Amino acid sequence: MSASLRIAALCGSLREDSYNRAMLQAACDLSPEDVTVTIHDLAGIPLFNEDVEAKGWPEPVQALRDAMGKADGVIIGSPEYNFSIPGVLKNAIDWLFRPAGKGPLFGKPACLMGASQGAFGTLRAQMHLREVCHYNAMPVLPKPEILIMKAQDKFEDGTLSDETTRKLIRTAMERFKSFVRDHPSS
């Protein structure tokens, strides 16, 4: 029997009751037994600044880097803002990819998810995330794509209630388990 997988999850929304946080919680709940998903809060991460970086990682950044370094894979769950990813997520990614080619996310297998009230889900944001992942040698689970559209109709009281979407996330987590085992990070 193989070891349990540790998956780190980053939420691109700081809103406590965000659909994306609820979506990531569903990924936690629907993961196979031997997969542990931990959602990491980005609220305390300071703005990326090379002057600050030169003095050492700020404590919240170091804690996030340590968690990402120990993870076997990462789920990035994010809304779409202005046809792209939210600044808070991009900022965290900037800290996590330093130094270039050696940061804790470099080469780490990824699963992208997103929920939006719009008709296109988070298609454009995920396209941008795929570019960021590609630059950093992160293999991305190709299918199923989790692009939750009209999220207001699929969540109830902070929980993903749409059974079709729950099945899709369960399938994604089962496939991501195999994907992570087939693409171990270096």
Image: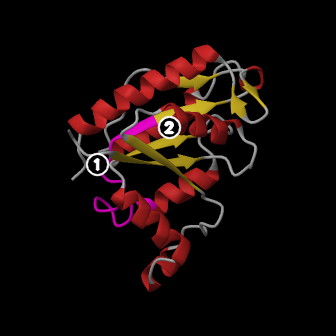
The residue that label 1 is drawn on is 107
Task: Give coordinates of residue 32: x percent, y percent.
Answer: 40, 32
Label 2 – label 1 distance at C-alpha: 17 Å
Task: Give coordinates of residue 107: x percent, y percent.
Answer: 28, 48
Q: Quadrant of residue 84?
A: top right
Task: Give coordinates of residue 58: x percent, y percent.
Answer: 52, 77
**Residue 55 image label:** none
Q: In this picture, which residue range is highlighted in magenta?
A: 96-111
Q: Is residue 21 above or below residue 146?
A: below
Mark 1 Cα-neighbour bin, 10 Å: few <14, some 14–19, many ≥20: many
Taking depth in this image into account, of 129 and 11 the one nearest to the observer is 11
Q: Is residue 79 visible?
A: no
Taking depth in this image into account, of 128 and 106 the one nearest to the observer is 106
The residue that label 2 is drawn on is 128
Q: Is residue 8 above or below residue 163?
A: below
Q: Nearer the viewer, mark 2 or mark 1?
A: 1
Query: Is 108 covered by the magenta stretch?
Result: yes
Instruction: Please give the name of the residue rendered at 43% of the width and 65% of the height, measured from the top-left corner.
Output: 65
Tag 1's secondary structure? loop
Prevalent SS, magenta region: loop
Q: Is residue 65 above or below residue 82?
A: below
Is 48 on the left-hand or right-hand side of 110?
Answer: right
Q: Is residue 120 above or below residue 173?
A: above
Q: Quadrant of residue 41?
A: bottom right
Tell me the amino acid under the disc marked 2: His
